[in-house]
Structures are given as structure tokens and as C-alpha cells.
Amino acid sequence: MIIAIGGPPGSGKTTVAERLAEGFGYALVSAGARFREMAKARGMDILAFSRAAEADPGIDRELDRLVLEEVLRRDAMGDDIVVDGRIQAYLLSQRRIPCLKVWIDAPVDVRARRVEERERGSAAAARHEIEVRERSERTRYREVYGIDLDDRGVYDLVVDSSEKTPERIVETILARVAG
């Protein structure tokens, strides 16, 4: 079973993916973690690396190739997989790879507060970073893949995380898996 979890920065997608992996034996494949590793290897922060990706579509293509390869490798080994990333559900759908596609979202103020707490910065800085990243990703994903991030039609399940704990969201996902 492959579960693809998408959502904007601060929505809780990575936390939910981690809880699924840790608590239920899913292998975790994280596009966000891989993107951060790529940025760090180039000596950049996330915003600088996002700007570099705007200028070089090869960055996104390389990231998504690496994530897809890992998902396919683990799937071939028989692993249950949770993959988190903004566009992984779209990419898996385009390749007709069966998976449960989940979008987790929350209002930008809620997400900014979460990022502020995680990064130990200010709410204003967190909101600014979120808005810059979302603009960058919207442009890049449309240009590189023809993906409209506002189109939720690809998702099997859409969850508002603003008043739900990660554990409750995991329960909702597992209930959908059980069918």
C-alpha cells in the first residue's frame, strides 16, 4: 500500500507521515526532507534553494526522480509506504501508480503559527516564508509538470488539520485504507 500525503508548508503532512511510518510500519519517503538535504548540500536555505529551483527546473526533476525511484524500490520489496511531498500524489497519479492520495491543509495563520513554533522564529517571518515558498512552488510545478496546486481533484481524501491532532488524522487515513 502506498499513501501519498500532500499539503502546504505547516499543514502537518510530514508529522502525519512520520506518525504513520513510526506507528504502523510504513516506510517513510519524504520529498521535503530530500529537498532540505539537497539545499544543505549546496549551502543554501530553503528559500534560496527554492529560488534556485525556479531558475533550474532540473532541481525539481532530480528531486522527484529520486523520490519516485525510492517509492518504486520499496514497493517492489513489498513495503507499505507513506510518501510526503507537495506534488507526489499528482506525480504518482500521472504514472498510474495505485495509492491513496491525501491532502492535508489548514488556514495560513494556523500553518504560520506551527512553522513559528517549529523554527523558533516569528509568526510574521513564518508567514512570509510560507507565502514565498507557495508562490515559488505554484509557478515551478505549473511550468515543470503542468500541475495546478489548487486542483484537489486528484486527492481521495482532503483533511483540514487546523483542529485535529496528527493522531486523529492518522486514524482518519487508516479508516479510509480499511475501507
Image: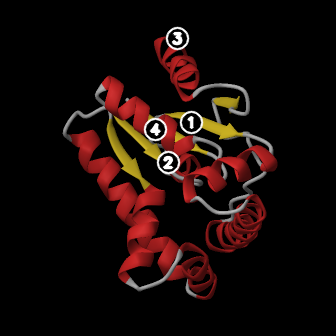
Where is residue 179 drawn, in percent x and y? Answer: 52, 11
Camera-side residue of 168 and 31:
168
Q: CA distance from mark 1 to mark 2?
A: 9 Å
> For the residue carrying disc 4, how many other residues have a C-alpha within 10 Å: few (<14), some (14-19), or many (20+)?
many
Earlier in the chain: of badge 1 and badge 3, it is 1
Q: Earlier in the sequence, mark 1 or mark 2?
A: 2
Q: Vertically, is 70 above or below 155?
A: below
Q: Earlier in the sequence, mark 3 or mark 4?
A: 4
Upstream in sequence: badge 1 or badge 4? 4
What's the distance in space between the residues labelled 3 and 2, CA to CA? 21 Å
What amino acid is found at the position of numbered circle 3 in the picture?
Gly
Judging by the rendered image, the residue that carries numbered circle 2 is: 92
Measured in 3D between alpha carbons, the distance from the residue under mark 2 to the one under mark 4, in whole angstroms, is 17 Å
Return the mark for residue 101. Answer: 1
In front: label 2 or label 4: 4
Above or below: residue 91 compared with residue 146: above
Is 90 located above or below residue 100 in the figure?
below
* Residue at x 52%, y 17% (from the top left corner): 171
Q: Is the residue marked by circle 3 packed among few (<14), some (14-19), or many (20+) residues within 10 Å? A: few
Mark sitting earlier along the chain (3/2)? 2
Q: Amino acid at mark 2?
A: Leu
Q: Quadrant of residue 147?
A: bottom right
Q: Say which residue label 3 marks.
A: 179
Residue furthest left as drawn: 77
Q: In the displayed structure, does residue 4 sit left or right of residue 161?
A: left
Q: Secondary structure at mark 2?
A: helix
Mark toward the viewer: 1 or 4: 4
The x, y position of residue 3, in whole percent, is: 46, 34
1 vs 2, front mark? 1
The residue that disc 4 covers is 17
Q: How far is the residue under mark 3 from the one under mark 4?
A: 19 Å
